[in-house]
Image (cartoon, rainbow, N blue to C red):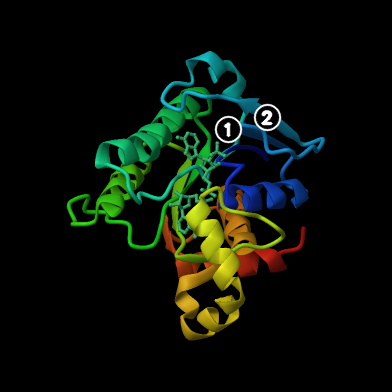
């Protein structure tokens, strides 16, 4: 399976990249990001690209892929709806349209978030925008598309968030994850389980198109038990 990965420099994307490189079923990974990941691996190729609203200049290089794992995204804190929409909806839809034109048999897996508002009309700005993005992606004629909605995510294997607030919070409170997991098992997963769940969806599909935190955690656990 050939994978194109967006957001590989972020916390979730670093976790997904790690599992892609470890997975023998993944033969090639292309990272498209504003900067390089700093990783070298025979399976990994990277394109540094600045304009996430337009991929015309690199569209020829986005051909021949089986799956897109889309981990690019930001916190909406301090952002206007227009700015958050530009990074969340506009970027994902621009990527999706470009990839669909070049790869009609592609599976698209989008990292969304717990609490996403599928009605697009709720009171919470980020949830509306993520809901609109999910709905747009779900309506596009991919071979398959899946929306994963993690809640709390325990970073593993040294991956770190790009967002200072998240990085500091995880550094200060990371030791509480086992307790939080014990108290709220439905709302906690790990970067490894999330990545393995996304890879399982890309390879084999899944029982539903929108996966909540508990679905992701279970699927990621089951995927880690699969023989490679
Ligand atoms: N972390 C969590 O606990 C959590 C929980 C639920 C859902 N999520 C969702 O998961 C997604 C990723 O989260 P994360 O924690 O991995 O975030 P992160 O560590 O902050 O990484 C964000 C990624 O998106 C890229 N990015 C941000 N703004 C961009 C822009 N304007 N143009 C191009 N690339 C841009 C970053 O690239 P640069 O390196 O170039 O900045 C980086 O690769 C987000 O949509 C978030 O809402 C996260």
Kindly indicate the quadrant of the structure image that contains residue 45: top right
Residue appearing at x 36%, y 44% in the figure: 138
Q: Residues within 10 Å of mark 1 (few under 14, many from 20)?
A: many
**Which residue has dot 2 on it?**
46
Residue corresponding to mark 1 = 33
Query: Mark 1: is the Cβ under 8 angstroms from ligand 1?
Result: yes
| Residue 141 in view, yes or no | no
- In the image, residue 208 lies at what x, y percent? 43, 59
- Secondary structure beneath disc 1? strand
* Residue 177 location (% of width, % of height): 57, 76
Question: In the drawing, what numbered circle is on residue 222?
Answer: none
> In this view of the protein, can residue 175 be seen by the observer?
yes
Residue at (61%, 76%) from the top-left corner? Answer: 175
Asked which secondary structure carries label 2, the reply is strand
Disc 2 + disc 1, Cβ < 8 Å: yes
| Side of 187 where 48 appears, left or right | right
- Dot 2 beta carbon under 8 Å from ligand 1: no
**In this view of the protein, which residue sits in the foreground, 117 or 77?**
77
């Amino acid at each position: 399976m050939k994978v194109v990965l967006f957001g590989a420099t972020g916390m979730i994307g670093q976790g997904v990249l790690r599992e892609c490189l470890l997975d023998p079923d993944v033969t090639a990974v292309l990272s498209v990001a504003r900067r390089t990941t700093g990783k070298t691996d025979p399976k990994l190729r990277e394109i540094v690209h600045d304009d996430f609203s337009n991929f015309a200049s690199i569209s020829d290089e986005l051909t021949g892929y089986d799956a897109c794992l889309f981990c690019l995204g930001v916190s909406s804190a301090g952002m206007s709806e227009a700015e958050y929409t530009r990074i969340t909806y506009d970027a994902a839809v621009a990527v999706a349209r470009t990839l669909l034109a070049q790869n009609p048999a592609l599976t698209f897996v989008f990292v969304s978030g717990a609490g996403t508002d599928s009605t697009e009309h709720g009171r919470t700005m980020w949830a509306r925008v993520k809901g609109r993005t999910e709905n747009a992606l779900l309506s596009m004629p991919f071979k398959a598309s899946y929306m994963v909605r993690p809640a709390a995510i325990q970073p593993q294997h040294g991956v770190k968030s790009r967002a200072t607030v998240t990085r500091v919070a995880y550094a200060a409170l990371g030791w509480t994850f086992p307790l939080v997991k014990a108290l709220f098992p439905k709302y906690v997963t790990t970067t490894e389980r999330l990545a393995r769940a996304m890879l399982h969806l890309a390879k084999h599909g899944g029982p539903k198109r929108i996966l909540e935190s508990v679905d992701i955690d279970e699927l990621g656990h089951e995927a880690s038990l699969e023989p490679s």
